[in-house]
Image: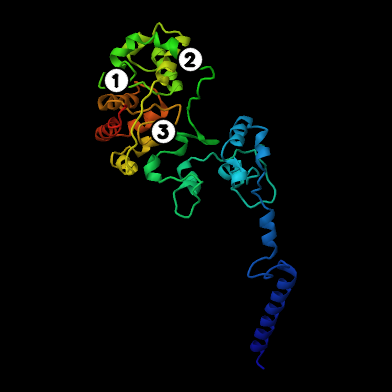
Amino acid sequence: MPKHVRRLIFLLVGFAVVAVAARNYLADKSFYEYGHYRGNAVAEIARDKPKFQGTKFCKSCHAAQYAQWSKGVHDSANIGKFVKCEVCHGPGGSRDPEKNYINAATGPVHPKNLKLVIPNDTRALCTLCHEKMPSRPKQQAQIVVDDHAGTQQCTLCHDPHSPRTFVGALVAPVHPGDAAAGKSKVGACVSCHGNAGVSLGLPGPTLAGQSEAYLVEALAAYKTGKRNNALMKAMVANLSDSDIANVAAYYADLKCDVAPKAADQAAAARAAGALVCTNCHGANGISADHAAPNLAGLSKAYLASAIRSYASGERSHVVMYVLADAASDAEVEKIATYYARATCK
């Protein structure tokens, strides 16, 4: 056998011996146990961070948010709704961003060295559960995203820790005003708002049946200048807090009944570009929320003027500013026309 052939054979045998030795003594014992990877990697990944700490871990530092969450619909395990803090904010035992989020079985636990994520795109996050789909249970709130709020974030209106609570929402007064006492204070209001709080084309809006909490807030805003209207500021200048509560109670106690509309309410609202408004003000102009006024009985001119005053900042309200500022003149006219058709009787 030629010498160079023998040398080649010895070289190949040497490579084989090294390969076998490497396989048996250098490679991980669990390699190829389940496939072309280390079998132990599965258990290591399972033990690796991120690790969920549970809601009690968050409670110690975030008691206010925990209290909102624990009383809200997201903490309703009895009906299958149990959305914990870390579902939205990420795991409490998180990977270290300073180490490029490497897979490490050990590492800092929030809040020692890092903060949890605060979701920026709540529109994408909330709709994972609440976008309308035929297969979802009816008791789970569902929305058609584009019709519900367009491109606006959910947190513009909803408190993220208690979604059924609206941002800036008002609650009914603990001690309601005296409607009888309020009646004696509204003599100067009649010329703009009507005898029974229904303006019927008068310059001011209909006040009959409005939420008492909303009326208190609105009158106080005129008095402090938060709402910029010279006439209204003069009208409420001499009213005490008690007077304002009584006037609000009087108008809230009056009736503004709106005839039920046809089954195509949603289609009509969509055509008018008013679907986003119906979430707070109702499809028929009667609001189910203390913070939002009824729009039924308001004139087209008043409605259009009010929307534009929110856009200009003449009236201060973060949600209405965002929505009104995004509306074109044509859209404002369509929305005002839609709600002006709902009249009190």
Q: Estimate the x, y position of residue 42 in percent, counting from the top left.
A: 67, 61
Q: Secondary structure at mark 2?
A: loop
Determine whether 150 is above or below 314 in the image: below
Q: How many marks?
A: 3
Q: Residue 199: give its label.
A: 1
Quadrant for the C terminus in the image: top left
Q: Secondary structure at mark 1?
A: loop
Q: Name, please, the residue furthest toward the right.
A: 25
First-in-chain label (1 vs 3): 1
Residue position marked by numbered label 2 in the rendering: 177
Front of the two marks 1 and 3: 1
Q: Estimate the x, y position of residue 240 in percent, counting from the top left.
A: 45, 8
First-in-chain label (1 vs 2): 2
Quarter occupied by residue 45: bottom right
Q: Which residue type carries mark 3? A: Cys
Q: Residue 280: give its label.
A: 3
Q: Estimate the x, y position of residue 247 in percent, counting from the top left.
A: 42, 14
* Residue ID at (26%, 19%): 202
Determine whether 116 is above or below 203 in the image: below
* Residue ID at (48%, 15%): 177
Alpha-carbon distance for marks 2 and 3?
A: 24 Å
